[in-house]
Amino acid sequence: MQQMDTFTPRHTGITGWISGNIRRKLLLFVVVILLIVVGLFWFFSATMLQPAYQNSLRSELAAVLDTVVNILDAEAAEGRPVLVYTRDAATGQTKPRLSDTAIQQVSDALESGALNLNGRCLEIADQNGRYAFGVDHLSPRCLLHPSHELGLSADGIFYVTPELNGEFAGLLRQATFEQGEIFREDTENGVITAGRIAADGTVSVIVTFNMERVGQAASVLKRLLLPLSLLIFLFGSCASWIFSRWFTRPLSRLSDAAREMAKGNYDVRVDIEADDEIGELAHDFNQMAYEVGRSAQLQRDILANVSHDLRTPLTLIKGYAETVRDLTGDNPEKRTEQLNVIVDESDRLSALVGSVMELSRISSGTERPEAVDFDLNDLCDELAYRYEEICRQMGNTFFFSGEEGCTLHADPNLLERALHNLLGNAISHVGEDGFIGLKVCRTGYGTVRCEVTDHGLGIDEADLPHIFDKYYRSRADTGKPGTGLGLSITKTIFTLQNIDYGVITEKGKGSTFWFEAPYMPPPVVG
């Protein structure tokens, strides 16, 4: 037999350290996943945050323009003036301003939430590029209306005077009237500007937003990302190490149990703690350990019993052979008698070996049942034909009673061997009247029953629980031919096919061995 090689790691160094332990593999896997997740988070927050926020601002500024332009267009469509001009008494110049109804519409939109100007600056100008109306929530940081004068009022209140018609505002208004709609991003000054004409091109509507806060938010996020990534990495590593211990503990127990089995301890079992795949593996291991232990026990039993049973016929064969050789070789009568003993013991030895091999094949599962539908009555009728002649030659009476249509779903070859064992056992225990019976019938309860009867001495009550055990022979069988394995083989055949069996006996009147199997009605034709 080839000796099993010991386990030798295929990798050394760092690769061997990682591949040599599942916990390290799990830890490495989680660490890599964390690094990928943190890297992606870093990339999207540092690289994609500002563009994504700018796209969102574009949509918000477009919504502001839509709301204000719709208000002004509605005013113009109803024939009401959008702008009202007044003359400045000091300079004599006319100044445009938004009409009261339009201002009221804008105020209503602000109050209802339809118009959101938080953090934004809104202005409306006429065709000549003059400021007419505005709502500034960026002052004094608004580039469209930069601070022109700062100071304190007489009441001690800080005030800001914005420059409403500055050069930058004039350029934006002119571009809006020329192009009809503008959208500009001034990354240098951190300003987003959107503009559109309204009221049949008589006014321009411009909205600005200061992107300085976006840059500040991105900068703060980048500063926080490094310690946050370290915390996530440490927490994930600790959690994965703890989880890997919980995950690999059942595998370690399986490994320990496998080592115990390798040492010959087939009673070792693994506790099943969960219903997952590892739990299924533990269940399969326990089943394997049970089967291996059963096979090992069977081998030990066979070896012990066979070595015991082989000793007697081998001793007799050797003794009589030596006697023939040394003493009776010239006496034909004694020589023939002693050679007959040798032949009989050789036959007994051959039968014993055959029975042991048959029991080993069936008990170990090497020979598995091949179930088919067949008529048990036909099988028993064929066996009855054979045993009638055997019983006639022995001076016995064989009686067969059968019922047609006793269909079973089982292995006919194994059942035939079981019936041979039962009939052989009946012949060995035939009574003075020489009666041996075989009966097959349907029970009316969905089963088919088969009985083998003899009119022998019956079975003692003390022997009855052990009658199907291997190598068990009652005192009444002492000196009778047989291996003590026939009924054990029969029991194994019935057990493999889930067939009920038993024995009915009465002391001094004989015994009836029986078995029952589910009846299989024939298929309906037509």
Image (cartoon, grey):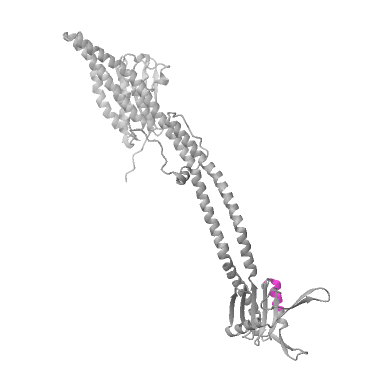
Q: Tell me if I can see residue 500 in this picture.
A: no
Tell me which segment is drawn in magenta.
Answer: 104-113
Q: Position of residue 252 (x, y in %)?
A: 49, 38
Closer to us: 25 or 496: 25
Tell me: residue 103, above or below residue 321.
below
Tell me: residue 98, above or below residue 255.
below
With 336 as the anchor, is 377 left or right in this view?
right
Closer to us: 483 or 377: 483
**Farthest residue in the right direction?**
155
The number of callouts visible is 0
Tell me: residue 15, above or below residue 399.
below
Where residue 357 sits, quadrant-wise, is: top left
Where residue 86 sits, quadrant-wise, is: bottom right
Q: What residue do we see at 56% from left, 59% from top?
A: 41
Which quarter of the rendered picture does the N terminus lie within? top left
**Farthest residue in the front direction?**
13
Tell me: residue 483, above or below residue 50.
above
Magenta-span inclusion, residue 293: no
Q: Position of residue 513 (x, y in %)?
A: 36, 23
Q: Tell me if I can see residue 525 in this picture.
A: yes
With 151 as the anchor, is 17 left or right in this view?
left
Closer to us: 494 or 154: 154
